[in-house]
Amino acid sequence: MTTAYLDSGMNKVLTSTQPPRQRKPDWIRVKAPVSKGYQNTRKLMRELGLNTVCEEAACPNIGECWTRKHATVMILGDVCTRACAFCNVKTGMPRAVDPLEPEHVAMAAAELGLEHIVVTSVDRDDLPDGGAGHFVKVIEALRRTTPATTIEILTPDFRGKMRAAVEAIVAAGPDVYNHNLETVPRLYPTIRPGARYYASLRLLEEVKAHDPAIFTKSGIMLGLGEERLEVHQVMDDMRSADVDFLTMGQYLQPTPKHASVIEFVTPAAFDAYGAIARAKGFLQVASSPLTRSSYHAGDDFRQMRAAREARLARGA
Ligand code: SF4
């Protein structure tokens, strides 16, 4: 079958196979993780039996983040019920939920002395509540054990049970609710086939409907073949849903079986997207090749909170 793709000069190329694997540009290369801080964070996660998206998603920032004791915990197991074309997490039939996991997450936050924690999960379409109740237990355990830690959750779309799931999680009182749109709607059938773009947007709206004071956050990956105007449209859609914080980062192909990188977006292009997003009214924007949902999440949260306070003061 003939397919078309854009090369790095944005020229359309016809091919009978997948686009060739592109060499990573210099701006995407990172140092191998070797520091003592990295080893300590790794040891703690192993001891507590916790999974992290940092490892499961083969995140390029793991050396930097774990050295600074920033790890994004992935709850509800390490097997996902979806099979997205961009994601490195295992797919299949998940195991039973670990009832000790909420306490272990709280112990990790305490041991690492975290001011801000990001908690995400695999999709659990097999569970009656999609795993929402387990998110609530994790938030409650964190509030008990480390009440000063601000909590950011990054949830799946809870397909078919979104309303009840969002209501329960928002009632538990996380500081930031993140749900990623991942890519532009045109690419959903190939990149995120188990999800629906407008259902994810509705989830973000629903969060704000339950608690207008909560911070909402969403992100997309660039380099999957999206067009510039499609990215602008996603920004407008997010602003319509009153999303506060937009993250944009370069998609990296975890293995040759995953979706190909169509383009390595330059740092200058990321800066330009970031400027447009700020002009569209997001409180906070992170846009760079190595940006990930949870990259520098604590610092960004503090900046976002300050930006909201400043905006409210201007309006008062
Ligand atoms: S950017 Fe997020 S997922 Fe990647 S290593 Fe840092 S905390 Fe983990």
Image (cartoon, helix red, strand yellow):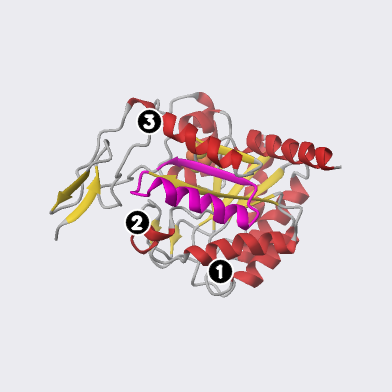
In the picture of the structure, the residue carrying the numbered disc 2 is 85
Amino acid at circle 3: Ile
Q: In this view, does 40 lie to the left or right of 301?
A: left
Q: Residue 251 sits in which quadrant?
A: top left
In the picture of the structure, the residue carrying the numbered disc 3 is 28
Residue 5 at x, y = what percent? 24, 48
Is 289 a magenta residue? no
Graded by Cα atoms within 10 Å as few (under 14), some (14 to 19) or many (20 or more), the crowding at tag 1 reads: many
Mark yes or no: residue 290 visible.
no
Residue plotted at (64% across, 55% down): 102
Mark yes or no: residue 226 visible.
yes
Q: Is residue 222 left or right of residue 143?
A: left
The vertical placement of 195 against 234, above or below, is below
- The C terminus, quarter of image: top right
Residue plotted at (62% across, 65% down): 132
**Nearer to us in this view, 6 or 70:** 6
Residue plotted at (63% across, 49% down): 105
The vertical placement of 240 against 282, above or below, is below
Q: Nearer the viewer, mark 1 or mark 3?
A: 3
Q: In this view, does 90 lie to the left or right of 197?
A: left
Graded by Cα atoms within 10 Å as few (under 14), some (14 to 19) or many (20 or more), the crowding at tag 3 reads: some
Amino acid at circle 2: Ala
Amino acid at circle 1: Gly
Disc 3 and disc 2 in contact, CB within 8 angstroms: no
- The N terminus, quarter of image: bottom left
Q: Residue 211 sits in which quadrant?
A: bottom right
User: CA gap, disc 1 to disc 3?
Assistant: 35 Å
User: Which label is found at residue 176?
Assistant: none
In the picture of the structure, the residue carrying the numbered disc 1 is 130
User: CA gap, disc 2 to disc 1?
Assistant: 21 Å
- The mark nearer the N terminus, 2 or 1, is 2
Q: Residue 297 sits in which quadrant?
A: top right
